Amino acid sequence: MLCCDADERFEQDFLVRLPDLLRKAEKRDRPLVTVRYRELWDGVAQYRSDGLWGKKTRCCAFPLPDTMTFQGRRHTKFHGVWYPQQLEGARHLLLPHNLYHLRMVKPEDRQARRERYEQLDPGSQYQRLGYDYLTDARGLKLTSLAGGEEYAFDTLPADLRARYPVEAHGSGSTGGLRRLLRGWFS
């Protein structure tokens, strides 16, 4: 099972290589496939890479067990993992590929996200770190997408395409996720 939120985009090279990567994970007995989680920041072709931002990862692929439950402490009010409880404790295979998060591109979205989490979790019960970091730009380091790290820019929401033209960042459209998936399943 491959999972992501609607406001996330996989690196295209990861998607192209996915069948081989899943076989590699199975062969190494590491059923939880994890990638680097990149928060796009002030543009659609750059991500925040300082401090904890550069260390984020996300489990995005796993085998489906015969039975599945999603209970217990690993899922909280609004933070959790995709894989079912039956895979808890399974080994991860961390791959050198990226999953990009669009929700942090614009300053007003970062502020709205911080306010939303502070309202849902006023005492930071579900995240000891709190939520101030979502808008804190101290130590900001941005890294531009390198060759091979592109995602399908033409699948971006219209407001982001208009506000942050891809050409301004030196990257053109990469062809589109829909065409890539159509090629796999046709």
Image (tube, rainbow, N blue to C red):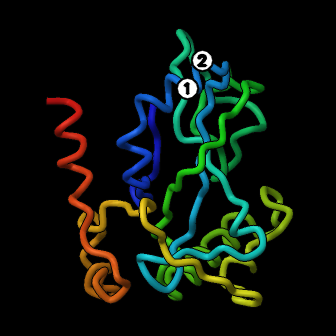
Quadrant holding the C terminus = top left
- Which image quadrant is residue 37 in? bottom right
Name the secondary structure under disc 2.
Answer: helix
Quickly name the residue at label 1.
Answer: 24
Is the residue under label 1 in contact with that under label 2 (CB below 8 Å)?
yes
Q: Residue furthest top?
A: 66
Question: Tag on residue 27?
Answer: 2
Q: Say which amino acid is labelled 2.
A: Lys
Residue 150: image location, x then y, percent: 39, 63
Residue 100: image location, x then y, percent: 49, 62
Question: Tag on residue 166?
Answer: none
Q: Residue furthest front?
A: 147
Q: On the picture, is 16 further left or further right than 21? A: left
Q: Say which amino acid is labelled 1.
A: Lys
- Which image quadrant is residue 18 in? top left
Sort mark 1 into few (<14), some (14-19) or many (20+) by Cα contacts within 10 Å: some
Q: Tell which of 64 and 94 is nearer to you.
A: 94
Q: Tell which of 49 and 42 is nearer to you.
A: 49
- Height in image: 26 above or below 117? above
Q: At 66% from the left edge and 68% from the top edge, which residue is drawn?
A: 117
Residue 91: image location, x then y, percent: 73, 28
Counting every numbered tag in the picture gives 2
Q: On the picture, is 70 further left or further right than 42? A: right
Name the secondary structure under disc 1.
Answer: helix
